């Protein structure tokens, strides 16, 4: 065969160079915006864990227990007997009556002991029936506070006391929080006390 035509040789070189990966061939192709959107959504699509109201139940109950103990100490020191509706205690029997009847500023000892035991159970993860116990105690304490004659006086401006009035307000508020949080339905899928609630195992195919 004869020598290649000059035009054929140049054409072959051009085809050869175009087949080789050059700088233009290695340029990144533009990414579709939909692809970027899907990638970003897959990163941020993790489920958000919401706080379980039961996390606050032992905190409110423990704080209310402290307010009850402090109120009992103040009532014992100042000789404030219970004066609940038609029931009246005696100033010289405050210590004895505090066991079963309570004082003017606190629930009875038996209720405070039950409250402390229920708080311990909730902290251990045994929410039932401890949450219902705390709800019932909170409801009874709100009624007990408001039924006390001394408490009603301390809630008025004319009967304000710099120790007893704040103690009464805190005690009523925390007792109401106990009642509400104890009756709130529990969210099984949220975290409680630093541990994730157990979920049902996936069904086998």
Image: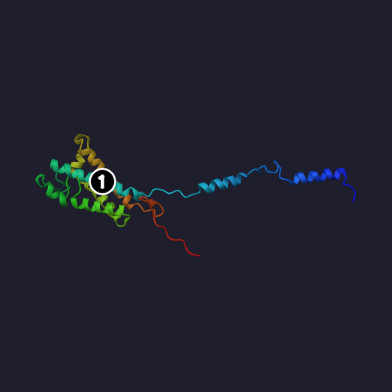
Q: How many marks?
A: 1
In screen coordinates, is 8 left or right of 55? Answer: right
Instruction: State how the image is colored.
Output: rainbow
Position of residue 100 measured from the top left corner of the image (x, y, whole percent) = 16, 52
Q: Which residue is mark 1?
A: 64
Q: Identify the residue at image location x=84%, y=44%.
A: 9
**Front one among 23 and 92:** 23
**Front one among 51 and 123:** 123
Outermost residue, right direction?
2
Secondary structure state at the residue bearing disc 1: helix
Outermost residue, left direction?
92
In screen coordinates, is 133 left or right of 108? Answer: right
Category of crowding for the residue at label 1, using alpha-carbon neighbours closer than 10 angstroms: few (below 14), some (14–19), many (at least 20): many
Q: Identify the residue at image location x=31%, y=54%.
A: 124
The answer to whether residue 51 shows anywhere in this view is yes
The answer to whether residue 89 shows anywhere in this view is no
Outermost residue, bottom direction?
205
Position of residue 133 measured from the top left corner of the image (x, y, whole percent) = 27, 54
Position of residue 155 measured from the top left corner of the image (x, y, whole percent) = 23, 39
Position of residue 143 measured from the top left corner of the image (x, y, whole percent) = 24, 48
> Which image quarter: residue 189?
bottom left
């Amino acid at each position: 065969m004869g020598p290649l035509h000059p035009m054929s040789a140049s054409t072959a070189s051009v085809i050869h160079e175009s087949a080789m990966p050059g700088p233009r061939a290695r340029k990144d192709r533009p990414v579709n915006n939909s692809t970027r959107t899907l990638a970003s959504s897959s990163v941020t699509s993790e489920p958000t864990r919401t706080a379980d109201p039961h996390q606050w139940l032992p905190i409110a109950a423990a704080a209310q227990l402290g307010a009850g103990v402090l109120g009992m100490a103040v009532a014992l020191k100042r000789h404030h007997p219970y004066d609940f509706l038609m029931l009246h205690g005696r100033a010289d029997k405050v210590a004895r009556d505090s066991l079963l009847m309570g004082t003017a500023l606190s629930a009875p000892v038996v209720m405070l002991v039950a409250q402390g035991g229920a708080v311990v159970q909730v902290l251990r993860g045994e929410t039932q029936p401890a949450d219902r116990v705390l709800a019932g105690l909170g409801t009874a304490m709100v009624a007990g506070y408001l039924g006390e004659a001394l408490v009603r006086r301390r809630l008025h401006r004319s009967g304000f006391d710099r120790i007893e009035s704040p103690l009464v307000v805190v005690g009523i508020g925390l007792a109401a929080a106990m009642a509400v949080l104890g009756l709130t339905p529990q969210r099984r899928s949220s975290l409680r006390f630093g541990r994730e609630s157990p979920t049902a195992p996936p069904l086998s195919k």
